Image (spheres, rainbow, N blue to C red):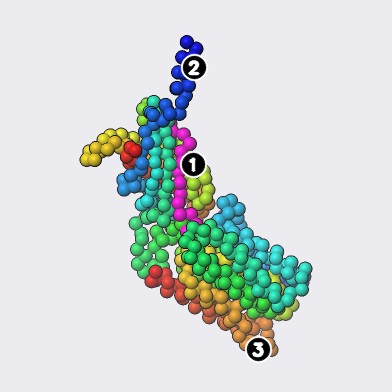
Amino acid sequence: MRKALLAGALFAACPLAAQAQAENYKVDPIHSFPNFTVDHFGVSSIYGRFDKMSGSFSIDRAAKKGSVELTIETASVTTGDNDKGSRPRSRDEHLRQADFFNVAEFPRMTYKSTNVKFSGDNPSEVEGQLTLLGVTKPVNIKIDRWVCREHPMSKRAMCGGNASGSFKRSDFGMKYGVPNLGDEIRLMINFEGYKE
Amino acid sequence: MQELVTSPVIQSSAAPFVVGLVVACILFPIRLAGLAAGAGFLAAVWMIGAFGLTPLTATRKIVVLAAAAPVVGVLADMAFKPTRATAPVLGALFAAASVWVFWSVLSQKPAAEAALLGGGVFAFVLATIAFTVSLRDRAVRAGSAGLFLGLGVGVGAVLGASALLGQYGLALGAACGAFLLLAMILGKRVVAGTTFTLTASASAALIAAGALILAKLPWTSLAVFALIPLAVRLPVPEKLPAWLQAIVASLYALAPAAGACALAWQSSRTA
């Protein structure tokens, strides 16, 4: 009887058993974008996004566990001002230089989860580490919408939703223009992923 | 008061000029007026809030070397008797350090492109420092070169889309301007030495290289900036008073500085 209990406990603790519950998803880059907004002179908000994001996420509903790993190409930043016209540089061009994202030295920023909180069966918040400009700091992301379903056309299993969060760019050494150009960056991420 | 301290104009002009002038006035009797360049520049970096070592980015490495330059310069002036080899040796030393400064960018590029970029920056830093340090016994000409290296690189960096490097360059120019002002007033009593010439040239060359690699300053501008320490060697009548010599030498330096900025402007219009 004791042997049977021990074997059962070992089986339950076996990583393979846990992995069997986990579902892995690869981020769909054409339907997943990190969008952001930043205050401009206290007058309005400038909206922008990164066009290139890749990564994956996993979810284990039974164990209430999950993970996220994202990589964002910093050179893909756009705020809708990429045509300099008669000016020396456009805003997007300036954003790629050393004053902001310094893409020559830091071509990528990454986000890696450390913990995923659940509300019922669905993930509700991701605790993780954002690495930007060589600085790694904790940034939490709230999952505002989470839906899993079959893609209506391809019939592949997919999950996705919307997430939001914020951080201070000066915490990552991006101090140019603070406080006239806002320090707080609000994130709005739309994401979709296909089951692997 | 807080608005003054945080104003980019104050940070990169008035503050480094005043700090440089005070340092030059206090230290010229002991032949260390050349510390004005480093003091004014580092005061500006402090006001901009850019001091820090982690992460050690290329921009921070530029500040580290700009802080090391006056120390090396004082050592060269005080501990060793400068020879003809001093200028190229120091140029080669800081040119080698420039590879370390920009390694984080160079290491991400294909080998051929990295070698071309790193080699070009090495040559530029070496030439700028060697030509400027050899002016160490001519304070007025060295001051004029430092002034327009700083101002030119600052304006060029702004045109190359880096406001921070632009502020650094302008601050360096302002600090060198403070040294030049004292040299205009006191003439040969003010000594530039390796302390001033190395600080001004190494800082300006690294900021310009940063604007090339981290922003969009064109190669052609760097090549023309390297002519500034050569331009101030053009003939200036020694009989003229120091202030007039400074004006003539500054006009000589202005020409390549303005030319380099014009190239940066042209590049920003077409790129």
Q: Main secondary structure of the magenta part?
A: strand
In the rendered image, residue A174, in percent from the top left (x then y), is placed at 50, 53
Against A100, residue B182 (above or below) is below
| Sequence order check, earlier mark of 2 and 1 | 2
Q: Which residue is mark 1?
A: A129
Q: Residue type at mark 2: give it.
A: Leu
Q: Residue at x 53, y 64 (%)?
A: B210
Image quarter (top left, top right, bottom left or bottom right) of the N terminus of chain B: bottom right
Q: Under tag 3, what secondary structure? A: loop
Horizontal side of residue A46 vs B73, given as left or right: left
Q: Under tag 2, what secondary structure? A: helix
Looking at the image, which residue sits at the far top?
A1
Horizontal side of residue B46 vs A85, given as left or right: right
On whether residue B73 falls in the magenta region, the answer is no
Front disc: 2 or 1: 2
Per the rendering, the mark at residue A6 is: 2
Horizontal side of residue B193 vs B8, given as left or right: right
Q: Residue at x 70, y 68 (%)?
A: B73
In the rendered image, residue B172, in percent from the top left (x then y), is placed at 60, 67
Q: Can marks 2 and 1 be said to lie on one chain? A: yes
Q: Residue at x 57, y 72 (%)?
A: B123
The magenta segment:
A104-118
Q: How crowded is the residue under tag 1: few (<14 C-alpha within 10 Å), some, or many (20+)? A: some
Q: CA distance from mark 3 to mark 2?
A: 99 Å
Horizontal side of residue B124 vs B90, given as left or right: left
Looking at the image, can residue A136 be seen? yes
Question: Which one is in front, A133 or A194?
Answer: A194
Against A132, residue A121 (above or below) is above
